[in-house]
Image (cartoon, rainbow, N blue to C red):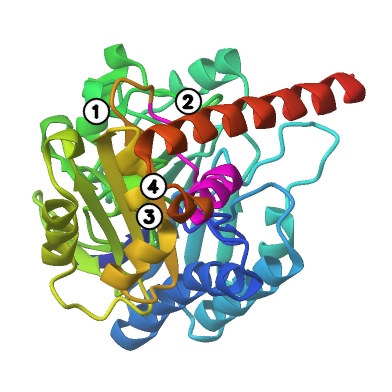
Amino acid sequence: MSLRFMHFSDSHLGFIDYSSDDQAVLKEREADAYKAVAAVVDHALATKPDFVIHTGDFFHRPSPYNKAMVEAGRQFKRLSDAGIPFYMIAGNHDLPRSEDTQAIHALYNMFDGCKIFYDQKYSTLDCGDFILHALPHITFDSDHNEEIQKISVTDTSKPNILMMHLSMPVSIYKEEEPGGGLFPADRLEILKDFDYVALGHWHRFNHMKNYGNVCYSGSTERINAGEADHDKGFVEVTLNGKVPEIRFVKIETRRYLNITVKNCDTKSTEEITGEITKAVNRDDLSEAIVKVILEDLRDNQSFDFMRENIEELTGKCLVLRLIKRKKGEEPIEFESGGESLLERLIGDIRAGFPDPEDFNKFREEATQLFDDLLQVDNNANQ
């Protein structure tokens, strides 16, 4: 028999993008995550899969904001009302680390056709036409490794599907997030016993064919600039025989544009602005998130490119992140979306210094004074 289902993951409902201090922008970015999940459910309602699975981090934090909880319930109810079974495991972001804290997932198990695994244990569920194996996030490494040793296929009369939220033991998935979890290399062969292995935790789609039918669906929304270079979406899977059909389905998300200008110390102001203009390509960026990185700037060059200068080139995008890296300095990124307050003040004053040497002297003294004031404030608070 043929079995068709959808796999999505890492929705991070309740995520707030603090790259802006504009409340309207914060609300827009929070809503992006809700819209992405709604788009996945829209597709499910339109195509009527046999079931839908989610492999963790549905929420961004263990105690979600009220709006995130309501939006999640709305989408779960849509699936339930349509008679589409929904299976989900807890991820490291949305599972409490304290045994005294109740997981929010218990609330959504009350919906008909909705089954969520959050008990930090490996378990199996016979779903009639297939067998579901679930390994939610497990906080402690010792328990994590013990539960992974239990994973096995004992009934091959029907398809076996494994859900996990963790990293794989390959270089591109080096685990850097505390408590993220890692699948042991000596257990990789067991994955080939499954008809499909649904993974969550990493945000880029990846069909890892070397290990069998193992697949990260990726996240449904971009969380940071490192996710600007790939599409977001979900996976459609059809099991009909030994070789499954695995298809990534893109969903429309807010544009995220990274622009990097290297070796600025060897370029004129016109050359640098020309590179930014070319990258923008006359596109309408009014709803986009734009990150501009200027590398290897000379001291004086830094003040040739203030936020308002870049806005003239990119237009009024939703969020503009301007990062300026001086030559020889360690990268310092002001993820709030612009230069520091001190930089902006000095930049505004620069026009009053026609002599570059006078300006440099002022800048050094102002910077030192600012540092002294910060030190006094820190000492007062200790």
Q: Quadrant of the C terminus?
A: top right
Stretch in magenta: 331-348
- From mark 1 to mark 3, how far is it between C-alphas? 17 Å
Determine whether label 2 and label 3 are within 8 Å by CB: no
Q: Quadrant of the N terminus?
A: bottom left
Q: In front: 380, or 288?
A: 380
Please name the residue that numbered disc 4 is placed on: 303
Give the vertical position of 319 relative to 197 (above or below): below
Please name the residue that numbered disc 2 is placed on: 181
Upstream in sequence: badge 1 or badge 4: 1
Q: Which mark is residue 219?
A: 3
In the displayed structure image, the side of residue 201 where residue 292 appears, left or right: left
Determine whether label 3 and label 4 are within 8 Å by CB: no
Circle 1 — which element? Answer: helix
Upstream in sequence: badge 1 or badge 3: 1
Please name the residue that numbered disc 1 is placed on: 172
Q: Residue 124: x, y in percent?
A: 48, 42
Circle 4 — which element? Answer: helix
